[in-house]
Image (spheres, rainbow, N blue to C red):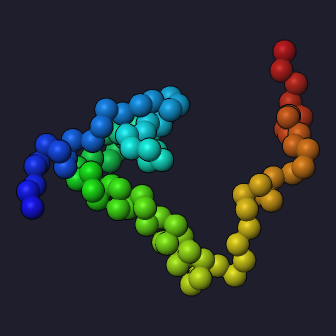
Amino acid sequence: MSYRYDEQHTPPEPTRVTDVAITTFEDLYEVDPRLMQEWVTQQEFPNWDSLRIMNSRHDHLEWMHEHFAHKVIHGSELLPADPDPNPSGEVSL
């Protein structure tokens, strides 16, 4: 078994998804690290660890639900059926 540092620590070139999100691997979305550098020290993860974390997220969420949630609801259930586009009632001129 061989370990090639560059292969394991250099993710694929990121693809911009939105103005704040990027993706490096399929289904792996993250906040653009450049937006967080001022507040959070960035850590380097080997590619295999990023993929391991991503692939175990559903197991982690299921465990959290089993141990802490009295009820699990979908986010869309929290939204009103017909949201008011101007909830404050303010009039813009």
**Quadrant containing the C terminus in the rendered view:** top right
Q: Give left or right: position of 66 versus 79.
A: left
- Residue 73: % across, % down: 74, 67
Is 86 situated left or right of 18 in this image? right
The residue positioned 54% from the left and 70% from the top of the image is 61
Instruction: Please tell me which residue is depicted at 31% across the width and 32% down the height of the picture.
Output: 13
Quadrant position of the N terminus in the picture: bottom left
Residue 91 or residue 56, whichever sits in front: 56
Q: Position of residue 54 (x, y in %)?
A: 42, 58
User: Residue 58, percent across and down?
Assistant: 52, 67
**In the displayed structure image, the side of residue 83 where residue 46 appears, left or right:** left
- Residue at x-position 41% and y-position 31%: 15
Answer with left or right where residue 53 lies relative to residue 71: left
Given the current orientation, which residue lies at the most extreme top position?
93
Q: Position of residue 72 (x, y in %)?
A: 70, 72
Above or below — where is 56 with respect to 10? below
Instruction: Tell which of 7 and 53 is nearer to you.
Output: 7
Q: Residue furthest bottom?
A: 67
